[in-house]
Amino acid sequence: MRQDMAPIERPQSRTRQRDVAVHAGRDRIAIFAATSGHSGVDRVVRNLTVQLDAWGIGVDLLRVRGHGPAVDLHALTHARAVDLGSRHVTGALPALVRWLRRARPTALLTDKDRVNRIAVLARELAGVETRLAVRLGTTVSVNLKDRGWLERTLQRASIRHLYPRADTVIVPSQGAADDLVDWAGLEPALVRVVRSPIVTPRLAELAETRPTHRWIADSADTPIVLGVGELGSRKDFETLVRAFAAVRRQRPCRLIILGRGRKHDQLRALADGLGVGADVDLPGFEPNPYGYMARAAVYVLSSRWEGMPVALVEALAVGTPAVATDCPSGPAEVLDGRHCGTLVPIGDVTAMAAGIGHWLDHRPDPADLAAAVAPYRIEQSARDYLSAVCRPPSTFESA
């Protein structure tokens, strides 16, 4: 790992862990998020669960079969999985109602709109006092922009009428919060910005692992440009490939995009058509992208929209500068004028190429890197989640 890497927070003391555990008692927090198993939401849920477990706080991970998040419960002490016995979120409603009546957790945190809607209905049908925090990790209006009129109308109506029945609505960025208030007409006091738990001690350990990819293992001299994410429309890797081709015409470099998706073949054909196919690799999903991030010369976020780009924060946390689109929402809040990354307009090949070229020639200030990722360190974020999910009076108030 590079020597200019930003410092990453170490675990808290054993004494502090015991202090928090004393206040935890037998109360538990439930988390319900039906995810792909390899998304940013998966990492948020996993990191939050690990930190709550370290504090001695019990977590019930409610699961729909065939969905994530994937959490290694064998490594945890106070977390457990609850199988709701359904393969679909909607079909899980009766089981969730029964479980809430039986378990009566202190709080329930949910993520994704379908899960949020089911959770609101389940709590009302169960008639329990469990606090409910629903989370949306994207900029909703942009996410739905290309959907049909009926789908947009129904989703706006469901958010406008169901979400106020929750105790709070959590979003990962101020941009996502403003969008939700403006688009869905929610009361600003209902929507709370909580930065995601992204920067963990484990991230630093994983970043030490050297990837076996031939370009990294065999040649450290040619700089690597890195992209990470699903190969779909939202990430707009086409713009990244075109920007890379412009840079490659001027200097040696290589592009690796980690992820899988329906646009794999299209991106491969685009790289070949631009004459840079030999210097572009799409190796698929990588469970440990952090070794790649730590050894890349520059990380590029080319998205058309986000809620809060987890991989952008992770790349900065391991010392790699970034070029990011100024998309709604999140990148501008992360970089915030600091000298560790460059914001460029969405879809602007020329600006993205210029940003990549700049960071191939310059190194970021470690102090700027540390400042950019500070709000996303796991202990701070987990405390903010507890404050939002379990507002006083709460057994977990002093965590």
Image (tube, rainbow, N blue to C red):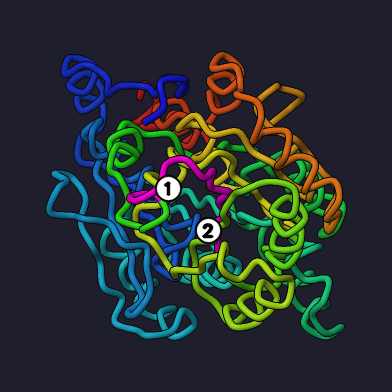
Q: Quadrant of residue 245?
A: bottom right
Q: Is residue 306 above or below residue 355?
A: below
**Secondary structure of residue under mark 2:** strand
Q: Is residue 120 visible?
A: yes
Q: Looking at numbered disc 2 in the image, what kind of residue is underneath it?
A: Ile
Residue at horizontal 54 percent and vertical 57 percent from the top: 228
Mark 1 near mark 2, Cβ–Cβ under 8 Å? yes
In the image, is 175 to the left or to the right of 10?
Answer: right
Front residue of 170/285: it is: 285
Q: Residues within 10 Å of mark 1 (few under 14, many from 20)?
A: many
Quarter of the image for residue 99 reads: bottom left
Which residue in the structure is indicated by mark 1? 292
Give the residues drawn in magenta, as a range: 216-229
Real-space Cα separation, disc 1 to disc 2, in angstroms: 9 Å
> Does residue 61 belong to the magenta stretch?
no
Relative depth, front residue between 27 and 1: 1
Q: Quadrant of the N terminus?
A: top left
